Image (cartoon, grey):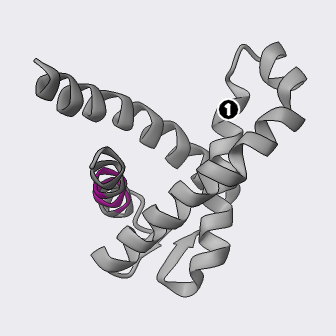
Amino acid sequence: MRWFIGILINAVLFISIAGFLDESFYVSSFGAAVAASVILSILNIFVRPILIIFTLPVTIFSLGLFLFVINAITLVLTDKIMGSSFEIASFGTALLMAIVMSLANIIIQKAVFESREK
């Protein structure tokens, strides 16, 4: 259930970020946002750990900030897999999205999951 809620949260974040980054980011529909969120979660399960291992020295040297770059890479991979229904204009846009999504996910998931545990 927690995975499904995370998928929906990411889909809503994709739609809201597409509203703010009108020229740089495009999502065709909510269904495409959900599909992109599922693909992103699969990439986070399989590809992200490999990228983290390969870039561990840089990640340690940057005090973990390089993880945003890894998140941006997974977003670009999601863009390539999704095709024309999910478009990110540049790597800079993907990096900005990675930062915004990471911060928003922390805030939203803390609010949703900590309120359920109490």
Residue 29 vs residue 116, the one in the foreground: 116
Q: Position of residue 64 (x, y in %)?
A: 69, 20
Residue 51 vs residue 17, the one in the foreground: 51
Let me know if residue 113 is in the magenta part.
Answer: no
Can residue 89 be seen in the rendering of this structure?
A: no
Which residue is drawn at the image coordinates 61% and 49% (left, top)? 45
Q: Is residue 58 left or right of residue 96?
A: right
What is the count of numbered marks? Answer: 1
Classify 10 Å Cα crowding around label 1: few (below 14), some (14-19), many (20 and above): many
Which residue is drawn at the image coordinates 41% and 31% (left, top)? 103
Which residue is drawn at the image coordinates 63% and 57% (left, top)? 43
Residue 46, compared with residue 37, is above or below; it is above
Which residue is drawn at the image coordinates 60% and 66% (left, top)? 78
Can residue 1 be seen in the rendering of this structure?
A: yes
The residue sitting at the bottom extreme is 84
Q: Quadrant of the C terminus?
A: top left
Q: Position of residue 37 (x, y in %)?
A: 44, 62
Residue range of the region highlighted in magenta in the rendering: 8-14
**Residue 116, picture quadrant:** top left
